[in-house]
Image (cartoon, helix red, strand yellow):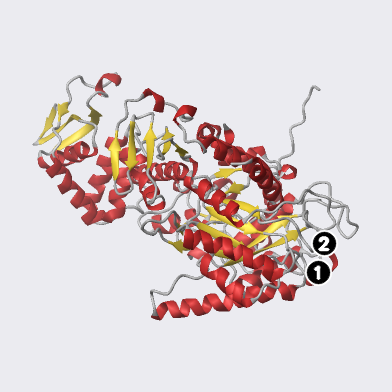
Amino acid sequence: MNERVQEKLKILADAAKYDTSCASSGSERGAKAGGLGNATGMGICHSYTEDGRCVSLLKILLTNHCIFDCAYCVSRKSNDVKRAAFTVEEVVDLTMSFYKRNYIEGLFLSSGIFKNADYTMERLVRIAKDLRTLHNFNGYIHLKLIPGASNELVQQAGLYADRLSANLELPSETSLKLIAPEKSYAQVYQPMNYLKDAIADYKLEKKHDKKIPIFAPAGQSTQMVIGASPETDLQILKLSSELYKGQNLKRVYYSGYIPVSNDSRLPALLTPPLVRENRLYQADWLMRFYGFKYNEIVDDRNPHLDEQYDPKLVYALRNMHLFPVVLQTAPYEMILRVPGIGVKSAQKIVAARRYHHLHIDLLKKLKVAVNRAKYFIDIPGNLLLRKQYYPEMIRQELSGGLTGNKPEQLALFG
Amino acid sequence: MAIATNIVTGELQYDGTFDGLLSVVFECYNLKLVPTSIYQLDAVLKDLFAQQNPIPIPTSKEQAERVMDGIKRYGGKEAFMDIYKTFLSEDPHREMVIYEYLRLLFSAKKPINGHYHEDAVMRVSQLVRQMGREIHRMHAFVRFQELADGLYFAPIEPDFDVLPLAYQHFRDRYAAMQWCIYDIKRNYGMLYDGEKVERVVLDNETFSSIQLPTELLSEKELAYQQLWKDYFKSTNIVERKNLKLHLRHVPTRYWKYLTEKW
């Protein structure tokens, strides 16, 4: 392995790292005889970087040469960084060699735009095609859809990749126009819409013909940068909700803006807005797994997520009339809304209560965070349950008890 | 032995195998024995409170299979896997937990996995989760190193005996490769020759640590390890450094597996 590849890998991994998607789940690509790899069920995180993010895929750019000049992007044309480009063979060899050693679940390939959209997209597709057809690779492949890429290439990408993603980049078109003048929502929605319909068609055909080859089995995702533009959390979550419902996206990723530029169109942040990003993911989780609608989490009166408390707790405090929940009889959907009770615990509660009366000790064994849940549940043994709680009382009791918000213990002596 | 009517209570002993433990369960029903403890052959000496002469129960494949059938009939395949995982957890009380669980299962005659108020059911569910986590970690953190002869080799030393449950994943995924995953703590491994998986025992001292000696490795192995380390460093975002979260995901005791941490 020559030093040139080593150098390229450093540059092109570094340039790709701001794309936060790491998922390798949700596909249905089984192993084939004589082939290498599979991508079924849940993904595997093979490592974690020091920033605590999962390493599941070999996430690289094909090249960081780019004709665009998007202010938020480290690879923008006007930025003075080292440029490099992999050959098709180099990407294939790295993917295969890392996969065989069980370092990765597969490849996440994106690229700067060189020459034009189709020229770039065609090369991404060729790598996926070579991996699948020449090397019999059945691991996970995530390809970036280059904005403005033609339908023919998007169709081909769907044949070889598990997941595809076109990034909206910013939570409103106005902001996108300002910060990335060469891009538009239309360019991003075009491949996204084409793929949405193509996936729907495929699913319909699959019903009649089990043998047709799988098509983008892990669906589509997108990403937007948070904190580089003035949108409220209400606007962001409304957009996400539409993307999940209207575009059938599997995931929306939120990437806290990391200052990579002194451009005057961007805010001068000292640190990335990590708490806000975290709250958005929590809200996103509530929409996807807990049956919440976006406007139950944020609304016109509260357009921003609370920084101090997580959105599920805030929802409960704002809707005290729905609590306490009687766990022995309440519907599953309502149990899910109790702060301190997750999906797994809620399922176990529903299983356990069929055979036995619930009590507080059993809840602890079922991994319910009783410290948080106790304000919101009616259950024998819950001595803390009062007739009525005022939200402020709970806020005060819980303040300091939440991760990330603990007041630092001050050292007494220097 | 305390004898009440025709039921015998006492300490029982088996050979430490899964079939052996199921034979114990069989004989408990057959001979109306109620165990107070169930010991492995050599475990008796370690327990100060043990009687020195527990009743040895011989292992019978046939009896074990009848118990297995019973578990599957009443609890389904899921209950069987739960019991097998509990056994492989090497928990010091696993035998009695399994005995209690099966007693409940055979009297209910239907799945009992929701009965969390029963200690044995709760304990089984905890141990199954614990095993699941360790299996998942092996799927994630096992690192193959290519040997000079082309075999991909991965030494492991998991907290529990998870290899019998973890290897299937690798057989599916690496069907076109020849590989071996070796548990250096329990001194046995699973070797896949491209067609079938076989249990093997190596008496070679060179395979006794997770990082294999350089002279065993293929020509390119170290270069790929270096590329992976480079990648790992480059994909990190310094501005987001969060070591607490990092450690929560990769506890330091797993670092020994990770090429990127060597």
Respond whether the residues carrying marks 2 and 1 are from the same subunit. Answer: yes
Disc 2 to disc 1, C-alpha distance: 8 Å
Q: Quarter of the image holding residue B18?
A: top left
Residue where numbered disc 1 is placed:
A182
Above/below status of A252 relative to A397: below
* Residue type (three-letter) at the residue carrying disc 2: Asp
Query: Would you call the spot at circle 2 few (<14 residues within 10 Å), some (14-19), or many (20 or more)?
Result: some
Q: Earlier in the sequence, mark 2 or mark 1?
A: 2
Q: Residue furthest right?
A: A264
Residue B173, image x, y percentages: 41, 52
Residue where numbered disc 2 is placed:
A69
Residue at 24%, 46% in the rendered image: B102
Residue A243, image x, y percentages: 64, 71
Examine the rendering and report whether any part of residue A340 can be seen: yes
Above/below status of B13 relative to A387: above
Q: Quarter of the image holding residue B132?
A: top left
Q: What quarter of the picture does the C terminus of chain A occupy?
A: top right
Residue at 17%, 21% in the rendered image: B53
Circles 2 and 1, Cβ within 8 Å, touching? The answer is yes
* Residue type (three-letter) at the residue carrying disc 1: Glu
Above/below status of B144 relative to A32: above
Residue B162, image x, y percentages: 37, 40
Observer-nearest of A263 and B82 = A263
B19 sits left or right of A293 in the view: left
A65 sits left or right of B24 in the view: right
Subunit ID for the residue under disc 2 = A
Observer-nearest of A128 and A232 = A128
For residue A410, the mark is none
B64 sits left or right of A72 in the view: left
Query: Would you call the spot at circle 1 few (<14 residues within 10 Å), some (14-19), or many (20 or more)?
Result: few
Residue A202, image x, y percentages: 49, 77
Observer-nearest of A239 and B9 = A239
